[in-house]
Amino acid sequence: MISHKKYMELAIQLAKKGNGLVSPNPLVGCIIVKRGKIVGKGYHKKYGQEHAEINAIKAAGKKSNNATMYINLEPCSHWGKTPPCTESIVQAGIREVIVAMEDPNPLVDGYKELKFRGLKTKIGILKEEAENLNEFYNKYSKRKRPFVILKLAMSLDGKIATSTGDSKYITSKDSRKHVHQIRNDVDAILVGINTVTRDNPLLDSRLVKGKNPIKVIVDSTLKISEKAKVLKDPGKVIIATTSKAPKKKADKLHQKGATILTLKAKAGLVDLKELMKELGKSEISSVMIEGGAELAGNAIKEQVVDKVMMFSAPKLIGNGLAPIKNLNIKTVKKAINLKNISSRQIGKDFLVEGYI
């Protein structure tokens, strides 16, 4: 007979199908098992649509009666965009509910509710895997700030570009494809104006045919060219600037369809903490910072970064640009130590991930 862990693994795998489609909601998968057989499966497909539990109950039909449900996140017990799932679980006649982790949202108390209604319950199966799966949601639901990934791509000797500024392409297509997958999964990409001016990037997910994220450009004096490629779809662009921005240009970009966020300046630059607060208000629950070195350093200094993803290509550049500026670390003792490190090979490159 398949163990609880095996069924929960299946629920977690199923939940991943909602990647990039459910934000600011969590990724949830659900499996219904009866007499050792899977009789229903479901996952949360899109924000505002039915939850995983409801889809699984529909798939199982009458077989839900007296069955066991496996779900990676505590079921909701309140009215939101959809009715509470706990009610449907009880009505379907589910006998036992096995949950991987509690919902960090204080409005959700489904586990206690189901216990109170007389269902057999168990919590904590593959808890760590479930928490990793929903790291964006977990931070956003607690703090109403997006989870921030800092992505860096560099040569083996730690350079993001040559001394002339050439940076295309240091890493392999496999790594770029992986980055495009993350672009699909996050809500927004954040870059500094220097990256837009130098590289004129599209910042889309074309290599995986994924959804195109919102582009956030940090541009304290509004230097952006109106012909920049990122402005091809202005409705998906947020430009964070300061009171130093020329009003005429701000109005023109706004008329084009871009959102202009005028934030207070910190040492002459956009206050990144304020920016994260504003993005959170717009239900942006995850952001990937993609460039450049100045923005990377400021984001770390301002303590807005949660996770670092560092791609290293087996190339040597010598004189060139370092990936992070302005940290002002004078001794190795003061270096920032990443936690929960993992590494893997992607194509010819290596990816190191860690948390700040």
Image: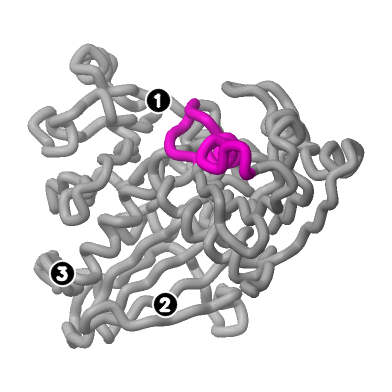
Callout 2: SS: strand
The answer to whether 40 is drawn above or below residue 156 in the figure is above
Instruction: Say which quadrant the C terminus sits in.
Output: bottom right
Indicate the position of residue 303 as horizontal and vertical percent values. 57, 54
Q: Residues within 10 Å of mark 3 (few under 14, many from 20)?
A: some
Label whose residue precedes the other's in the sequence (1 or 3): 3
Magenta span contains residue 277 = no
Q: Which residues are magenta?
A: 44-63
| Residue at image location 22% in from the left, 63% down from the top | 177
Q: Which residue is mark 1?
A: 261
Circle on res. 152: none
Q: Is residue 213 left or right of residue 299?
A: left
Quarter-of-image position of residue 189: top left
Callout 1: SS: strand
Between 91 and 86, the residue placed more toward the observer is 91
Q: Residues within 10 Å of mark 1 (few under 14, many from 20)?
A: some
Q: Which residue is mark 3?
A: 173
